Amino acid sequence: MSSDPWGRVDEAGTVYVRTADGGERVVGSWQAGSPDEALAYFKRKYDGLVVEIGLLERRVQTTDLSAKDATTAIEHLREQITDAHAVGDLEALGKRLDKLVASVEARREERKVEKAKQADEAKHAKEALVAEAEELAQSEQWRAAGERLRALVDTWKGLPRLDRKSDDELWHRFSHARSAFSKRRKAHFAALDAQREEARKAKERLVSEAEALSNSKDWGPTAARYRELMAEWKAVGRAQREHEDDLWNRFRGAQDVFFTARSEVFAERDAEQAENLKLKEALADEAEQLLPITDLKAARAAFRGINERWEAIGHVPRDARPKVEGRMHAVERALQDSEEAEWRRTNPEARARAEGLTGQLQAAVDKLNGQVETARAQGNNARADKLQKELDGRQALLDQALKGLHEFGG
């Protein structure tokens, strides 16, 4: 017979394990060898259970083994220990399983709390996404808002699901906000497309007119019309992208044809007008040599000849015109002044009127002189002063009349 602190083998080869209550339980029989070999064999069975429990303990501590799977594994080992054909401290193994059950339950509670926390965080995160989506639904920043809504969808997909009711309600609001934005954006771009189609038609008309004007030689009015067409073009707005560039190139090309032709003509005209200016400046020099006028008849004839040559020359540059024409006008005014002076001097009727007026004024002055002397002699100084003022006025008129009469040569 052979024995061990946790088991024994009797003479018949029956193997026993000691139980927690102090009794024994048969775990097998051994006929193939010595009793010590029998105990060693059943101890190895016990050691195998120890290894299995140790492995389960490490799995519970170091992996994400679910509580359900851990509980199933524990119960399976407990059944093995209860009916184990092994020799060893089976009660200690049961206690280790009890501690492992407590550990699994603690982890289950931790996970439950963590899961509740994650669910609460997920709910708040989804509520924040819904609030932002509902705000974006009213935006008119179509591109930025659209990109942000797509990013929110990706964020939503990365969040854990809530309870079905809460998740469905929040998703309904989120989806409704996206749909509202898409509907508004679609309506906006439909209206924009309609506007751009109207702009395309309007620009087609502008291009047609611009092309029709491109060969015009009516430089001023056509250039003015092109400016009006450009203002209308800007006011119309943009057409569709695929049409806008082509229409603009045609519109701009028609203008270029016209303005290039005009520039060539104007360049030729400017050269001609520059030469005209030199000729007119020479004539202005020649006209100014007539001043001062000493022989009116000769000066008038000479100026007439100069002016005929002047009129035959043609236009000069606009910015130079006032100065050169002003020089000719100054000579012309000098001739006119001389002619007026000559007319006054040789006009018999005007001379007669001047002589008559001079005689009348002289008689009035002589009369007033006499009245002033009489008033002074009578001591009536007040009347004398009043008559003196009237006399001074008539004398001034007489002096002016005498000067005019002198111009007639008298």
Image: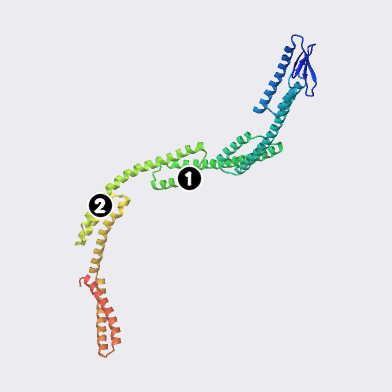
Applied colour scheme: rainbow
Can residue 49 be seen by looking at this rendering?
yes
Task: Provide the residue designation for mark 2.
Answer: 281
Q: Is residue 29 above or below residue 259?
A: above
Residue drawn 80% across the image and 19% down it: 24
Foreground disc of the pair 2, 1: 1
- What is the C-alpha distance between the residues marked 2 and 1? 46 Å
Helix, strand or loop at label 1? It is helix
- Quarter of the image holding residue 71? top right
Q: Position of residue 348 (x, y in %)?
A: 24, 71
Residue drawn 48% across the image and 43% down it: 206
Is the residue marked by circle 2 packed among few (<14), some (14-19), or many (20+) residues within 10 Å? some
- Quarter of the image holding residue 143? top right
Q: Amino acid at mark 2?
A: Glu
- Quarter of the image holding residue 61? top right
Number of the label disc, if any, that sits on residue 234: 1
Q: Position of residue 367 (x, y in %)?
A: 26, 84
Q: Is residue 64 above or below residue 18?
A: below
First reached walking from the N terminus: tag 2 or tag 1: 1
> Quick one: 316 or 102, which is closer to the camera?
102
